Image (spheres, grey):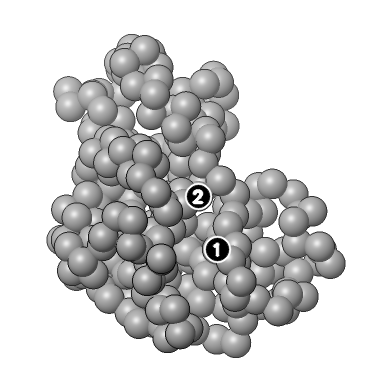
Amino acid sequence: MILRTLVISDIHGCFDEFMELLDLVEYTVGKDRLILLGDYVDRGPKSKEVVQYVLELEKKDEVIILKGNHDERFVSLVERENPTVREMFFKYGGYETLKSYVPNFSMEHFDEAVDFIRQEYRHHIEFLNRTKLYFEDDHFIYVHAGLNPKFKDWKQQPVPDFYTIRETFLQGTVDTEKRIVFGHTATPLIHESGDIWMSGEKIGIDGGCVFGYQLNCLEIGNEGKLTQYEVPSKQKRSRI
């Protein structure tokens, strides 16, 4: 019997905070359902460690792992030679990801670094490639970025919307009876706090850990009670 659902998003290489948060909530394999909403890489210092640990979690019962836009971009960088993807990758924290996989990484050896990841960490890329776009239970829909209110059947929205949509989702109303738990947009951008944001049908849980705020966990009890747990970031505070 599943006692709780625990939801965490946007770890972004903050491996130490992630481990501390799982310990804080006393996550128990087999008793808790753990849902991770994506963005395991970029910006933070330990993307490789996060991906490896989450990959191991995938083997456990009741672990749901979703795809984030940073994860998708990392996969695209390794699998396809695309200058636009490369530019966006480095613009949004990709340098730190490559440093975690290749400690002596430098830009002049970019091609060699990507080739090294392609060969030695193919299992990481394959894992990130097979993560889910969304998950739903009786009362909630879980997704990285949000749902597009322009689609009556949200499951028919374009695939990138699941991990990239922002203002259209935040400002709109989605035709669903279930509440939507999402990450992607750091809550300090929504209500100037790293705490979980709740407004009607929407629950935003990305506490902006990689920007120096906090890593959140939303606990959903069997009675529907919602509880927040958080671990302060070990990262230097920066602009989001």
Q: Amino acid at mark 1?
A: Tyr
Q: Which residue is mark 2?
A: 66
Mark 2: amino acid: Leu
Q: In the image shown, does 225 or 188 lie closer to the viewer?
A: 225
Looking at this view, name the residue that lies furthest to the right: 152
Residue ID at (37%, 71%): 3
Q: Position of residue 77 (x, y in %)?
A: 48, 27
Give the residue drawn at x 55%, y 63%: 142
Q: Secondary structure at mark 1?
A: strand
In primary-sequence order, the first of circles 1 and 2 is 2
Q: Is residue 168 above or below residue 193?
A: above
Q: Would residue 99 be seen by someone viewing this image from the given angle?
A: yes
Q: Are marks 1 and 2 in contact (CB under 8 Å)?
A: yes
Compute the Cα span from label 1 to label 2. Answer: 9 Å
Q: Position of residue 151 (x, y in %)?
A: 82, 63
| Residue bearing mark 1 | 142
Going 69% across and 68% down the picture, which residue do you hit? Answer: 168
Q: Is residue 217 left or right of residue 172?
A: left
